[in-house]
Image (spheres, rainbow, N blue to C red):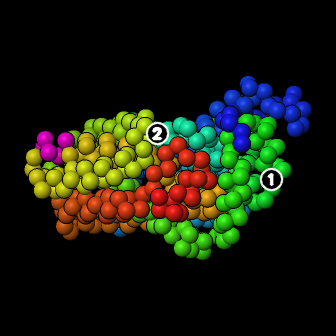
């Protein structure tokens, strides 16, 4: 078993089969990390960019309340398709080709948003971009995890969520800059093309995953990569997993072996993101329902940057306090925060403090969405499992985003916030009983711990 983390891609001067130099290893490590982080950032950018643009889009394209909900929910619906689809493709055909393909879809979709003429076109384009986002979740973090060493893996993967929240916050800033520009929402949405171009350039030349090669029985190729780049892989544990896990594909996720992991990864992720996406997408409408509409733009900026602070804190402590402690207590606290705002909607201090605690702790726990799902599945099912969990998480988020404006119209903000609190309670209960402790375990051993319920 090799013990030095992978770092760099071979340059033309390196003879075939020769070990990569330290400089080459560092270049590969940096390139892979940046390519993955920017991919996560553009996911957040595309989701977050709609928040401040929604009012102008509604006026320019004459959207009904149902069309507003579909514009907000369409990327989340697309993720439902893209996560399982790209995840299955990456488990079957390899990580490398899928890693590049989904970013090309981002690039094309970003440009097309500028030219939409009606709500239907915008909904369809953002639906396709959502398919690419699902692909990014299914392949980005799993590929990076398969190159990472066991120590510090949580912090490395959690840093992807920082990128997501930075992308979300950056989209909010860009959206705010264009709010006073005629047709500015078009420039705001299309600006993600710039990020996509950078990411496509970075993804060229990334080698295949040695763990995936082992899962396909290609041991010689895998060991050549491990030796060349000094990848930390427990080869025997990976091969044992391959022998033990004889089923692959979606049916395997619901076998007795993997059902526990499938339910846990899907439910905890859905419970975390449903309130965040729904409230963030219709932030202005929520604040107006709470009679604080004049402060909505400033509050959304605070919301976004508080989330960045929260996920950064989660990233810093994920390997220190363990996965379970970062997940379960914040679920209960954030549920209480939303419930308090619902019970005292006329109190400005309660609204401010309640939302700040909700945002910070929800974002801190969300660091685990880039860690837990890919630690609880074996290599042969990793991207399929992550893709499915991504899809299930976005089903909840899409439903919440679609229903929230209608819920505000018919039942008011208090009811909507109580529903959000209830969703968080469900996440807390499921995590309490099903979440394994996988801190500092090799990926293969972490997946085994999850299967055994340890």
Q: Is 88 on the left or on the right of 154, as rendered?
A: right
- The answer to whether residue 357 shows anywhere in this view is yes
In the rendering, at what x and y percent does residue 366 appear? Answer: 41, 48
| Label ID, residue 311 | none
365 lies above or below 121? above
Label 2 element class: helix
Q: Which residue occupies the extreme top position in the image?
A: 23
Instruction: State yes or no: discs 2 and 1 in contact (Cβ < 8 Å).
Output: no
Mark before the other along the chain sequence, 2 or 1: 1
In the rendering, at what x and y percent does residue 87 appear? Answer: 62, 61
Magenta residues (range): 348-353
How packed is label 1: few (under 14 Cα within 10 Å), some, or many (20 or more)? some
- The answer to whether residue 176 shows anywhere in this view is no
Instruction: Identify the residue shown where x is 86% and y is 33%.
Output: 18
Please say whether residue 404 is one of the residues in the magenta stretch: no
| Label ID, residue 219 | 1
Q: How many marks?
A: 2
Q: Measure the alpha-carbon separation of dots 2 and 1.
A: 31 Å
Give whichever of 200, 274 is nearer the camera: 274
Q: Is 410 on the left or on the right of 192, as rendered?
A: left
Instruction: Identify the residue shown where x is 50% and y is 50%.
Output: 438
Give whichever of 140, 184 is nearer the camera: 140
Residue pointed to by mark 2: 319
Instruction: Identify the residue shown where x is 60% and y is 71%.
Output: 252
Label 1 element class: helix
In the rendering, at what x and y percent does residue 171 appear? Answer: 44, 41
In the rendering, at what x and y percent does residue 236 appear? Answer: 71, 52
Instruction: Identify the residue shown where x is 78% and y is 27%.
Output: 21
């Amino acid at each position: 078993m090799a013990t030095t983390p992978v770092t760099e891609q071979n340059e033309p001067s390196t003879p075939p089969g020769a070990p990569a130099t330290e400089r080459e290893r560092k270049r590969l490590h940096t390139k892979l990390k940046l390519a993955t982080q920017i991919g996560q950032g553009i996911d957040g950018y595309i989701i977050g960019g709609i928040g401040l643009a929604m009012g102008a889009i509604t006026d320019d394209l004459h959207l009904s309340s149902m069309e507003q909900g579909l514009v907000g929910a369409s990327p989340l619906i697309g993720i439902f398709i893209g996560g399982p689809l790209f995840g299955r493709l990456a488990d079957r055909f390899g990580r490398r080709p899928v890693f590049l393909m989904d970013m090309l879809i981002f690039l094309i979709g970003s440009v097309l948003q500028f030219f939409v003429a009606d709500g239907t076109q915008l909904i369809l384009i953002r639906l396709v971009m959502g398919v690419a986002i699902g692909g990014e979740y299914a392949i980005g973090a799993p590929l990076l995890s398969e190159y990472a060493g066991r120590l510090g893996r949580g912090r490395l993967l959690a840093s992807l969520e920082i990128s997501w929240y930075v992308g979300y916050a950056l989209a909010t800033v860009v959206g705010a800059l264009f709010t006073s520009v005629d047709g500015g929402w078009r420039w705001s949405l299309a600006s993600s093309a710039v990020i996509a171009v950078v990411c496509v350039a970075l993804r060229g030349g990334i080698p295949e995953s040695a763990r995936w090669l082992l899962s396909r029985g290609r041991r010689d190729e895998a060991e050549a990569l491990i030796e060349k780049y000094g990848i930390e892989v427990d080869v025997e544990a990976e091969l044992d997993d391959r022998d033990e896990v004889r089923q692959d594909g979606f049916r395997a996720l619901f076998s007795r072996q993997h059902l526990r992991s499938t339910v846990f990864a899907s439910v905890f992720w859905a419970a975390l993101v449903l309130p965040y996406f729904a409230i963030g997408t219709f932030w202005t409408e929520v604040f107006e329902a709470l009679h604080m509409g004049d402060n909505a733009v400033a509050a959304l900026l605070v919301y976004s940057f508080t989330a960045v602070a929260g996920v950064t804190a989660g990233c810093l402590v994920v390997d220190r306090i363990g996965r379970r402690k970062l997940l379960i207590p914040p679920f209960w606290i954030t549920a209480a925060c939303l419930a308090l705002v619902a019970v005292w909607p006329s109190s400005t201090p309660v609204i401010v403090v309640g939302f700040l605690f909700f945002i910070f702790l929800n974002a801190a726990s969300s660091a685990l969405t880039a860690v837990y799902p890919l630690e609880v599945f074996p290599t042969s099912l990793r991207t399929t499992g992550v893709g499915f969990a991504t899809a299930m998480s976005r089903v909840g988020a899409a439903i919440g985003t679609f229903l929230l404006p209608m819920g505000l119209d018919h039942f008011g903000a208090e009811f909507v916030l109580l529903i959000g609190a209830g969703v968080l309670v469900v996440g807390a209960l499921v995590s309490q009983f099903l979440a394994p402790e996988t801190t500092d375990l090799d990926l293969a051993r972490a997946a085994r711990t999850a299967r055994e319920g340890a």
